[in-house]
């Protein structure tokens, strides 16, 4: 398991209620969701948001099945097939739309290379966080007011490649920043923003994004409606905070593990290559397998090659010059010599390593058929 896989496992355990223990003293998520509905009613009365016609309540019936009741119409339907996994007692399922303000697309105005207020784009969303690299800016007063981010806002990347569409980041801080049109603002209501951000980074939501994305010519898209329909496992608020704290506690260790795993992988590749070279070197030095006397010697093989060459010369398939072979041997003085015709020369400095007693050094041209333009030169010594 590599670092990324370990992180994904931790996030999945977290949103399934398996990362931290449940506390029976926690206020259940059903109470939290009711508070959120009350807050929304208050915002509607103040005309800060419009009533969501698709708002719903998800509950478990006496038959142990999950049902969704549409608040506007009273319609009830079974959604067992949509539920991705079981959650602990005290948790609740809901649609994302029921725990956030209405999602909002970013500015479509043209950005500037310099200006008053930074504009975050999809490239500024990295690993669940906002990074302030390669910023563009806005001098549009209305946009700078309308799209101003607040601490804890989530930004959902609605248009990107198939792999990256749906990546999400949490905005932290009080600096004046707005966001571009390829991003969707998700502003939580009475729900821990970091908890929701971890949900969006989990394998569950990444899988959901792959299922609901629309494939375009070059990029994929997930609109605000599809994001709003996401089923979200809501933990009691106190447990949300414990989950966030635990993830923050373990992720640095995961990062260290990831770096160690990466270095180990590099080492394994390096060792594998070294081992391969070592095996090949052992082979050509006669150390990989034992020598068997009954198999004969390399000198006998060289004599057979010489005989075969003589036959080829008689058939006209080789020139007589091919018979001007050299003979490499070890003298009584333990030095290596090469005999070519009547000329004998000390070539000890050319010998790279010692060979078994039944092996011989020879030039490459002795054992290869001559080639028109790539005939081995006499400079190449071949262990036989």
Image (cartoon, rainbow, N blue to C red):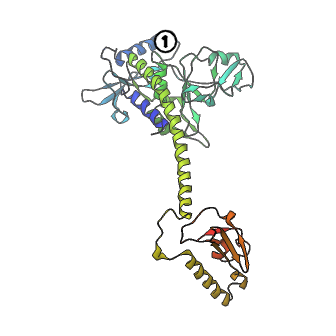
Q: Is residue 77 left or right of residue 162?
A: left
Q: Residue furthest front?
A: 333
Q: Which quadrant does the N terminus fall into?
A: top left
**Which residue is more in the foreground, 256 or 335?**
335
Name the secondary structure under disc 1: helix
Q: Position of residue 190 (x, y in %)?
A: 45, 15
- Answer above or below: position of 341 versus 292: below
Q: Residue furthest left?
A: 62
**Which residue is more in the foreground, 38 or 113?**
113
Q: Is residue 152 left or right of residue 340?
A: left
Residue at image x 63%, y 31%? 123
Q: Position of residue 119 (x, y in %)?
A: 66, 23
Q: Is residue 51 left or right of residue 87?
A: right
**Which residue is more in the foreground, 314 or 289?**
289
Q: How many marks?
A: 1
Q: Residue furthest bottom?
A: 314
Q: Position of residue 314 (x, y in %)?
A: 66, 90
Residue at image x 67%, y 65%? 348
Query: Which residue was labeled with disc 1?
Result: 43
- Answer above or below: position of 156 versus 221: above
Name the image quarter holding residue 74.
top left
Can residue 152 be seen here? The reply is yes
Name the image quarter holding residue 308.
bottom right
Q: Position of residue 3 (x, y in %)?
A: 49, 36
Name the image quarter holding residue 354.
bottom right
Q: Residues within 10 Å of mark 1 (few under 14, many from 20)?
A: some
- Answer above or below: position of 377 versus 278: below
Q: Which quadrant does the C terminus fall into?
A: bottom right
Residue at image x 53%, y 65%? 286
Residue at image x 56%, y 47%? 270
Can residue 228 be seen here? The reply is no
- Answer above or below: position of 12 versus 21: below
């Amino acid at each position: 398991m590599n670092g990324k896989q370990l992180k994904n496992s931790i996030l999945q355990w977290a949103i399934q209620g398996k990362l931290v223990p449940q506390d029976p003293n926690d206020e259940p998520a059903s109470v939290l969701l009711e508070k959120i509905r009350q807050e929304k009613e208050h915002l509607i009365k103040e005309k800060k948001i419009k009533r969501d016609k698709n708002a719903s309540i998800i509950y478990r019936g006496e038959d142990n099945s999950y049902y969704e009741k549409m608040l506007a119409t009273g319609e009830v339907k079974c959604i067992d097939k949509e539920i991705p996994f079981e959650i602990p007692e005290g948790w609740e399922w809901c649609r994302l739309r029921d725990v956030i303000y209405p999602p909002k697309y970013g500015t479509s105005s043209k950005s500037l290379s310099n200006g008053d207020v930074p504009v975050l784009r999809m490239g500024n969303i990295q690993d669940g966080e906002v990074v302030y690299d390669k910023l563009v800016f806005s001098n549009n007063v209305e946009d700078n007011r309308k799209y101003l981010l607040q601490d804890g806002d989530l930004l959902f990347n609605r248009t990107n490649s198939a792999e990256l569409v749906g990546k999400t980041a949490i905005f932290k801080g009080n600096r004046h920043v707005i966001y571009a049109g390829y991003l969707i603002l998700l502003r939580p209501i009475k729900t821990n923003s970091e908890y929701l951000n971890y949900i969006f980074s989990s394998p569950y939501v990444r899988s959901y994004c792959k299922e609901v994305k629309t494939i375009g010519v070059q990029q994929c898209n997930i609109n605000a409606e599809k994001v709003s329909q996401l089923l979200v496992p809501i933990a009691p608020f106190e447990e949300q905070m414990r989950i966030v704290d635990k993830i923050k506690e373990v992720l640095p260790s995961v990062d260290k593990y990831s770096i160690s795993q990466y270095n180990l992988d590099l080492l394994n590749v390096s060792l594998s290559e070294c081992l391969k070279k070592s095996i090949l070197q052992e082979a050509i030095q006669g150390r990989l397998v034992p020598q068997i006397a009954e198999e004969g010697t390399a000198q006998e093989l060289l004599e057979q090659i010489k005989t075969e060459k003589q036959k080829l010369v008689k058939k006209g398939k080789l020139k007589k010059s091919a018979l001007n072979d050299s003979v490499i041997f070890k003298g009584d003085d333990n030095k290596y010599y090469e005999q070519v015709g009547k000329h004998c020369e000390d070539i000890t400095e050319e010998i790279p390593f010692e060979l078994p007693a039944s092996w011989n050094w020879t030039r490459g041209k002795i054992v290869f058929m001559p080639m028109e333009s790539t005939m081995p030169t006499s400079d190449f010594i071949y262990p036989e």
